Amino acid sequence: MFNFMSKTITPLYFKGYRYLWIGMVAVGVATMMQMTARGYLAYELTNSASKLTYVNVAFAFPMLSLSLFGGALSDRLDKQKIIQAGQFAASFLAFVIAALIFLDYINWVHLLTVSFIQGGIWAFMVPSRHSFIAELVPGKNLNSAIALNSAGFNVSNLIAPAVAGLIYGLAGPDYVYSIIGGLALMGVFFTFIIKPEMRLNNDIPDNSQLEKKEILSEIKIGLIYIYNEKLLFSLLIASLIFSLLAEPFRFLLPIFVKDIYLKGPEAMGLLTTMMGFGSVIASIIIAGIDANKRGLIWIIGGFITAGCLLTLAISGSYVISMIVMIFMGASDSIRRTLSMSIMMEKTRPDLRGRIMSIYMLNWGLIPLGALPAGIVADIIGAQSTIGILSILLLISSALVLITQKELRTVN
């Protein structure tokens, strides 16, 4: 047990990674508080599943169009500065929404616009943040560092939604957004205090000697590389399919809470917290175990997610949904953490930013599943929609298990 825990927290012994991790947790709390508050506020303002979905998926369109550029810039510029700029911009937008709510000028279009802008911010910040980890820990600790990164974000998922729901119900959404802005500024501070000597692989680009390549050419290099790497390409496509089928549930959750369970924002926050609890447990276990059979475990995560969605589609019980959300969070963490660690470990170091930006397209393509799901939910209901998605995910998981031997056996 001692060896397990020691291996789990080893990356935190490196000061640079520890500062990045604390800042990431602060921004993660802010992000999850925002998702809870924004979703409930959007549905409260519109009472429309379609408009709720528009708000929740607006971030994905700039992510689709800009993430490849963000990855290329991550490989040619200082990742730390890119992260800081993104965190500061996120803080500013949160304070803007807080002011609009306080002045009673808020409407759903404001939420839609900010969601869209945030997608652009994340397109540049996330590839840098993930690839920056490899500069702060030794290669042998990279899998644990990525799992701890996921665990930190999942701790945010555990705490933030319940806190956001409680503050929303007691004080109002303007207070929630003010706290979100403060937490993002905290992330700026902890990223700022990472010194160059804390980097084990000091990859700060020297712009004076940087080869003047067209950025489109650098993007093309990344695309060709991942296409030629069979394992990475299979993982990318399978991750995309799983995301398209699993992620729409997150955007329809306010409908389940308000119309099916007949609850308020506090109940929605508690459900998301239960999902976060499952995610934290799974992330900690992944951080402490050996890296064997990761591909098979990743595929099993897809089966678990499908079973959870099917249960939620059949049951109208809030109590049952609380239990299911624990397993939902665990399976989601398994898929995200293992896919990211495999991507990072199997990719050439000089291409990590670009490969992570390609992987981020999964997030940007979520509207292909979430947007139609929101429209269909208006017609046949949220539970029936989720039931269809669960069956499709079950079939997809079985096909990946049977056909993708290299992914299934990756260690």
Image (cartoon, rainbow, N blue to C red):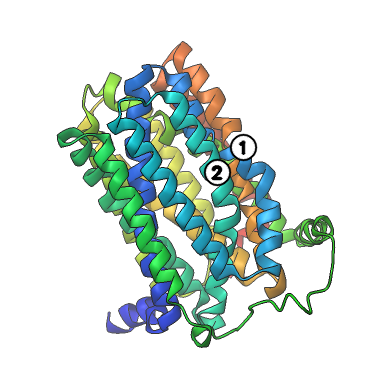
Task: Say what amino acid the circle numbered 1 marks.
Answer: Phe
Q: Residues within 10 Å of mark 1 (few under 14, many from 20)?
A: many
Label 2 residue SS: helix
Can residue 387 be seen at all in this image of the molecule? no
Labelled disc at residue 119: 2
- Which residue is painted at 39% across and 63% down in the image? 187
Which residue ends up furthest to the left in the rendered image? 170
Name the image quarter holding residue 151. Answer: bottom left
Residue behind mark 1: 61
Which residue ends up furthest to the top in the rendered image? 379
Q: How many marks?
A: 2
- Which residue is painted at 59% across and 60% down in the image? 127
Measure the alpha-carbon separation of dots 2 and 1: 7 Å
Q: Position of residue 226 (x, y in %)?
A: 75, 59
Can residue 7 be seen at all in this image of the molecule? yes
Residue 93 position (above or below residue 377): below
- Which residue is painted at 57% across and 33% down in the image? 367
Marks 2,1: beta carbons within 8 A: yes
Q: Is residue 314 left or right of residue 65?
A: left
Among numbered discs 2 and 1, the one appearing first in the sequence: 1
Give whichever of 95, 238 is nearer the camera. 95
- Which residue is painted at 71% across and 55% down in the image? 233
Which residue ends up furthest to the front in the rendered image? 103
The quarter of the rendered structure image containing the C terminus is bottom right
Name the image quarter holding residue 315. Answer: top left
Q: Position of residue 349 (x, y in %)?
A: 68, 74
Q: Position of residue 225 (x, y in %)?
A: 79, 62
Q: Position of residue 67 (x, y in %)?
A: 65, 50
Labelled disc at residue 404: none
